[in-house]
Image (cartoon, grey):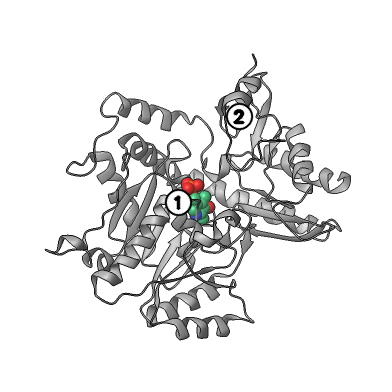
């Protein structure tokens, strides 16, 4: 039996209607920006395997560090015990984050990093005997697939079956020049109930790569600070260079109280999540009263292998060559965008850092369920490129090691898709 047949017998894939799913392509090997299927066919991973792989596949340096750690300590319970890789990663990461981040809390993916952030905020107010329970979020936000993370995400086809069970959240539009004063007034009106504001800085990923300006986010954060609403930057997608700076929040004057990190954290090697917070938040949990403890933890909290992968990934990220690559991709995206912007098949197009998004003209509304999605997906796959459209929106979000040649190949494929589809 082929791998495809065996897969279809026993596997249920994520975000996939299994009834009429396209065959799942067995991948046997990765190298740099490429993955290879069992027939040796090569694909350019232009979306960094769901946005996690920032330095390319099977990076030899990360592999070497991880493999050395495997022979020393694969895992140990993280309550009552600690280890060098977790401490070292926290020591290195905290000073890199914008603002005064003081403590690292480990989990194992982006959704749980968000859950912890929400719990930190809600319990912060509870511990201080000033219970505030409302949360503010953006309408098209995506913060993950667990129930708390779904609750603070925009209501969409992803949450449809669960909407009645999700807790109430105050949703606001993305800020712009025209609505910023109204949004600020909305926050002021709710100030006594609002525990926190959670946001994806500069770009809403799964919501359709929707981009907005740092200045308006900054204004929202300023109001939140003024009226004691805690702020959570969900940098699960934007972290580690994606938007052109190490973290998207570097572009803000007002710094958030909490950061959520995952995806690029381990260079795409291992699952790991991190929630960081300021000392002020941490101190609200220090007490002789045991009820003020943050009762949260996962079996694989601070897995040493994942921490070592993150340390290795950080080493690579901080090399000047990586920053040059990020700047190079940014500049080339900008050039390509300028060229195709006015194409009649393009409804809107935009760019933040290394992310370029193009919204295809459709007959109906822009939607995740657009029929164009499978047509575009297959078109690029046939050309050996993994681009996984969000409905009629295609985006390039490549590993930073992608060469000019491969970028050109992807741009060329988009050009021909614009002419042919
Ligand atoms: C992907 C994502 C998450 C969820 O992370 P998982 O590791 O998939 O659970 C949360 N927030 C943002 C902004 C994301 O892009």
| Residue 202 visible to an observer of this rendering | yes
Q: Earlier in the sequence, mark 2 or mark 1?
A: 2
Q: Circle 1: is it few (<14), some (14-19), or many (20+) Cα within 10 Å?
A: many
Q: Residue at x 60, y 63 (%)?
A: 140
Query: Furthest-left residue in view?
Result: 288
Query: Is 138 in front, or is 360?
Result: 138
Query: Is 306 in front, or is 213?
Result: 306
Up/down of 209 relative to 284, above or below: above
Q: Residue at x 45, y 82 (%)?
A: 190
- Is disc 2 placed on a helix, strand or loop? strand
Q: Nearer the viewer, mark 2 or mark 1?
A: 1
Q: Circle 2: is it few (<14), some (14-19), or many (20+) Cα within 10 Å?
A: many
Badge 1 residue CB within 8 Å of ligand 1: yes
Labels in figure, total: 2
Say which mark, if any, is on residue 178.
Answer: none
Query: Furthest-top residue in view?
Result: 1
Q: Residue at x 59, y 71 (%)?
A: 174
Residue 178: where, in percent of width, then height? 64, 82
Query: Is 157 in front, or is 312?
Result: 157
- Is disc 1 placed on a helix, strand or loop? helix
Residue identified by numbered label 2: 35
Give the side of residue 55 with respect to residue 90, left or right.
right
Residue 413: where, in percent of width, then height? 78, 41
Give the side of residue 242 with respect to residue 334, left or right.
left
Up/down of 392 relative to 4, above or below: below
Query: Is 64 in front, or is 374?
Result: 374
- The CA span between labels 2 and 1 is 26 Å
Up/down of 286 relative to 328, above or below: below
Residue identified by numbered label 1: 111
Residue 313: where, in percent of width, then height? 42, 40
């Amino acid at each position: 039996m082929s791998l495809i047949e065996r897969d279809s017998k026993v596997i249920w894939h994520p975000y996939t209607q299994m009834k009429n799913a396209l065959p799942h392509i067995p991948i046997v090997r990765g190298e740099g920006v490429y993955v290879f299927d069992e027939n040796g066919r090569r694909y350019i991973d232009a979306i960094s395997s769901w946005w996690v792989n920032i330095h390319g596949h099977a990076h030899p340096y990360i592999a070497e560090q991880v493999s050395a750690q495997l022979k020393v300590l694969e895992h140990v319970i993280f309550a009552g015990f600690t280890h060098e890789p977790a401490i070292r990663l926290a020591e290195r990461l905290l000073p890199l984050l914008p603002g005064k981040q003081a403590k690292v809390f480990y989990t194992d993916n982006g959704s749980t990093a968000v859950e912890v952030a929400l719990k930190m905020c809600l319990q912060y107010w509870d511990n201080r005997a000033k219970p505030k329970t409302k949360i503010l979020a953006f309408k098209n936000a995506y913060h993950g697939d667990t129930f708390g993370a779904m609750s603070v995400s925009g209501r969409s086809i992803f949450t449809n079956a669960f909407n009645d069970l999700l807790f109430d959240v105050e949703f606001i539009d993305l800020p712009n020049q025209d609505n910023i004063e109204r949004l600020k007034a909305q926050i002021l009106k709710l100030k006594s109930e609002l525990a926190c504001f959670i946001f994806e800085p500069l770009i809403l990923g799964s919501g359709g790569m929707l981009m907005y300006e740092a200045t308006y986010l900054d204004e929202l954060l300023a109001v939140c600070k003024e009226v004691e609403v805690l702020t959570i930057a969900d940098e699960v997608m934007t972290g580690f260079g994606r938007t052109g700076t190490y973290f998207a929040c570097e572009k803000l004057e007002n710094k958030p109280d909490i950061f959520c990190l995952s995806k690029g954290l381990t260079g795409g090697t291992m699952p790991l999540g991190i929630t960081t917070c300021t000392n002020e938040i941490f101190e609200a949990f220090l007490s002789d009263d045991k009820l003020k403890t943050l009762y949260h933890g996962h079996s694989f909290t601070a897995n040493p292998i994942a921490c070592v992968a993150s340390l290795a990934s950080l080493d690579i990220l901080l090399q000047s060559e990586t920053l040059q690559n990020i700047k190079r991709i940014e500049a080339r995206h900008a050039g390509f965008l300028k060229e195709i912007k006015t194409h009649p098949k393009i409804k809107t197009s935009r760019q933040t850092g290394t992310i370029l998004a193009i919204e295809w003209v459709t007959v109906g509304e822009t939607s995740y369920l657009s029929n164009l999605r499978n047509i575009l997906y297959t078109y690029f796959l046939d050309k050996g490129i993994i681009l996984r459209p969000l409905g009629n929106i295609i985006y390039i979000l490549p590993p930073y090691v992608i060469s000019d040649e491969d970028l050109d190949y992807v741009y060329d494929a988009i050009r021909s898709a614009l002419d042919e589809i």
